[in-house]
Image (cartoon, rainbow, N blue to C red):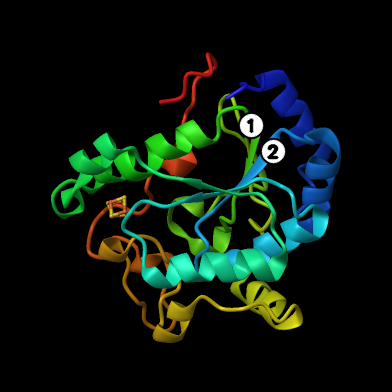
Amino acid sequence: MSAIDSKTIQRIMAAYGHLDGRDLLVALIKGELTGRIAVTSSFGAESAVLLDLVAEVDPATPVIFLDTGELFDETIAYRLELERRLGLTNVIVARPTAEELAEAAELWRVDADRCCELRKVRPLARAVRGFDALVDGRKRAHGFEREHLSTIEDGVGVLKVSPLANWSAEEIEAAFVARDLPRHPLVAQNYRSIGCWPCTSPVEAGDSPRAGRWAGKAKTECGIHTLVLGRDGSGI
Ligand code: SF4
């Protein structure tokens, strides 16, 4: 990680914090942060909306896809479908090392935090080195820790950008319809937020989309969005 400094982050937040959606992506990808910004995507239930906007702005934008080794087969297929459909030309697949996978085997049953660190946080930390800004699809409408999310945040050494932070579930749905975007195959089975298969469940109508992640446990986030990479660029 090249470690963007705090002063620069504050300046960018002041200059572009009032923008969202496509306007924010244009300002950062085509202007201020050209070549230094990447998208992280799970290719999950709502990912097509952000990826469609990114592809419109610049289809060569790096898109980092974390393959934990425990994803649904449907997610792997959907990633290829979306990549082709949207014309994304720079999807980077980040994976745990063989050693991390060996330690993480079945670990989700007894220590989900350690499992997420090995399968998600560490591989992502390696993949994002060299980027000053990371774009994600988080939204306030997801609730839990995301209720007070801003479109641009200081991630300590990295600018965190959430262009859809202000978007409602209705606006996301409208974008799917307006752009005729393909749906993740599991959405038809009431999966609304889709991660690793052992830790993802379908939800009831009216539930938060995130209610199906680590259902029945206190855990609500995997740690990748609170990743602190350190200003020395060492990552994890
Ligand atoms: S979501 Fe579950 S299976 Fe995936 S890394 Fe975290 S604990 Fe492991």
Most extreme residue toward the top, as rendered? 232
Residue at point 18%, 48% (across, down) = 105
Could you tell me which secondary element the residue under label 1 belongs to? Answer: loop
Residue at point 42%, 73% (across, down) = 74
Query: Where in the figure is residue 168, as x and y percent of width and height?
Result: 63, 69
Residue labelled 1 has its Cβ within 8 Å of some atom of ligand 1 = no
- Residue 37: which numbered mark, if any? 2
- Residue 131: which numbered mark, if any? 1
Location of residue 196 with respect to 61 vertically, above or below = below
Q: Do the residues under discs 1 and 2 have CB atoms within 8 angstroms?
A: yes
Could you tell me which secondary element the residue under label 2 belongs to? Answer: strand
Q: Is residue 136 left or right of residue 126?
A: right
Foreground pick, 133 / 82: 82
What amino acid type should be assigned to the residue bearing mark 2? Answer: Ile
Query: Where in the figure is residue 218, as x and y percent of width and height?
Result: 26, 54
Location of residue 212 with respect to 38 vertically, above or below = below
Task: Identify the mark nearer the N-term, 1 or 2.
Answer: 2
Foreground pick, 148 / 228: 228
Q: Which quadrant of the rendered structure holds the C terminus?
A: top left
Foreground pick, 108 / 192: 108
Can the viewer see residue 26? yes
Alpha-carbon span between mark 1 and mark 2: 5 Å
**Counting other residues with Cα less than 10 Å from the Cα at mark 2, is it few (<14), some (14-19), or many (20 or more)?**
many
